Image (spheres, rainbow, N blue to C red):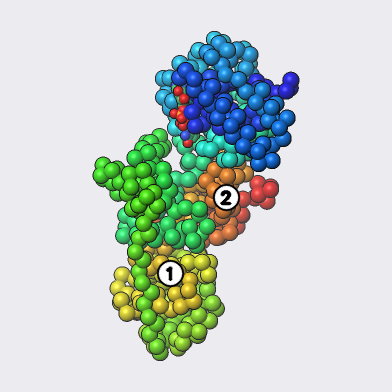
Amino acid sequence: MADKITIGVVGAGAMGRGIVQLFAQAGHPVRCHDAQPGAAAAAVDYVAGMLQRNVEKGRLAPDAFERIRAGMSVAGDLAALAGCGIVIEAIVEDLGVKRELFRSLEAILGDDAVLATNTSSLTVSEIAAGCARPGRVAGLHFFNPVPLMKVAEVIAAVRTAPGTVQVLKSITEGAGHRAVVTADQPGFLVNHAGRGLYTEGLRVVEEQVATPADVDDVLRDAMGFRMGPFELLDLTGLDVSSKVMASIYEQFQQEPRFRPSSLVPPRVAAGLYGRKSGEGWYRYENGKPVPPSSRPVPALAAGLRLFLDPHAAQADTLKALAANAGLIPVTAGSDADLAIVQPWGMDATSTALSLGLDPAKTVALDPLTPFGLRRTLMLTTVTTSVVRDAAHALLASDGVPVTVINDSVGFIAQRVMATIVNIAANIAQRGIASVADLEDSVKLGLGYPHGPLGWGDRIGAARILAILRAQHEATGDPRYRPSPWLVRRVALGMPLVSPEAAR
Ligand SMILES: NC(=O)c1ccc[n+]([C@@H]2O[C@H](COP(=O)([O-])OP(=O)(O)OC[C@H]3O[C@@H](n4cnc5c(N)ncnc54)[C@H](O)[C@@H]3O)[C@@H](O)[C@H]2O)c1
């Protein structure tokens, strides 16, 4: 252990314990301190108990366990942290208390010791500003639970020295976590990149395009998100999430891309927090969500004449489905009982009109979502209920679930994906992190199946731009203005993730 830096951890709560475990397992001597008497000892015992279970399961050798256990100790007071090369604080989220702690630590530690804060929402530069040597202060932001969430953000505050960033990056990667470096900007990297899922999901519901359960179903089942935005909001608690949404918007000087939804404050006032209060966007019984009632699949009418937009992205599979279901293909829209179109970045009504189709007989199917997972069926403003039911019956005829939504530029998935990619493009534009760090942090920190810019490449950057421009034009809302970083790359035909950054 001689070559391993001694690490102090102050604050032995949920995060502090995880940080102690991570670095102790990596072979560092770790000293843990908490203002609450007994809390640090309880944390060390807790970590030892977790590791003991690994020994019992055969995942950890008994002698390795003994070494790790011997490396962890309790610091009865701050002075016992003297000699630590790095101290990481995970105490209460309060600027004054954190500044006071760092001031006290500066008096105890050597001049080249590094001070790191695990703050989620404070500005690291503000914490550092209270220190005599702000160059040694940085953020080291872990995610809960620390040992399992294999990424940490190293936050370079305005006056953080490059050497400080390097030390934190190297101990974090030495402990097996991916360390991503980010500027001291609101939400740092992961929480910044994760805004789009919530803001656009809420906007879709606000506009009466779809219900919260529809939004979650499409994003989870068809796009591969682990959870939809409303499931996530219910899990975190809307009382907590609403503050984060408001704070990031304010910290970004009221940037429209992060504007919170007016749907949220009345729900917070009414106590609809989510799981913890028994009701949020979903209702919970015995801790389990009660499934919302879904639209029954109508019976398939016989002898319907179907017109398919010849440019539809999924025309071949649609044709096969229609043939199996006994529909009669027609080549002129005017002969059809039902017309199906597949627009990118257009609503169903405009698409019907642009193709000379009768909007009352037209529906749109999202070409972005894979055909076999879940289909999104979008109505025009005047699609009749007979046409809606015929289209629903056809699209569900092979057992694939169908979500029926109202007219919207870009369905659910196109809108949310375009928003996520645009926010990521602006993170790159602003140099908040490198593209490689951005991509990895989103996959590891948010569990998305792809990094946001790589996902944009898969969908097609030009399509993403077209969706944003169409939404911008349809709504006049500056939240949809495309990032210049995206616009230039589309103009040049460049990928959003260069082969070097993709690794
Ligand atoms: N919980 C999360 O999911 C999460 C994720 C990332 C970052 N964070 C951040 O990590 C920090 C800690 O969060 P947590 O969830 O572990 O909190 P927690 O409430 O579980 O634990 C905080 C601990 O700090 C101790 N403490 C408070 N003031 C102290 C002081 N002045 N000196 C020494 N000890 C003190 C408390 O006794 C407590 O044991 C916060 O800044 C939080 O924003 C939390």
The one of 47 and 487 positioned closer to us in this rendering = 47
The one of 415 and 239 positioned closer to us in this rendering = 239
Image spot of residue 492 (x, y percent): 59, 55
The N terminus - image quarter: top right
Which comes before the other along the chain, label 1 or label 2? 1
Q: Is residue 413 left or right of residue 285?
A: right
Image spot of residue 177 (x, y percent): 63, 37
Which quadrant holds residue 384? Answer: bottom left
| Residue displayed at 58% across by 32% down | 49
> Residue tagged by mark 1?
402
Q: Amino acid at mark 2?
A: Gly
**From where the camera sits, is residue 32 visible?**
yes
Q: How crowded is the residue under tag 2: few (<14 C-alpha within 10 Å), some, or many (20+)?
A: many
Per the model, the C-alpha gap separating discs 1 and 2 is 27 Å
The one of 283 and 338 positioned closer to us in this rendering = 283
| Residue displayed at 26% across by 42% down | 269
For residue 458, above or below residue 319: above
| Residue displayed at 43% across by 79% down | 394
Image spot of residue 95 (x, y percent): 42, 23
> Residue tagged by mark 2?
451
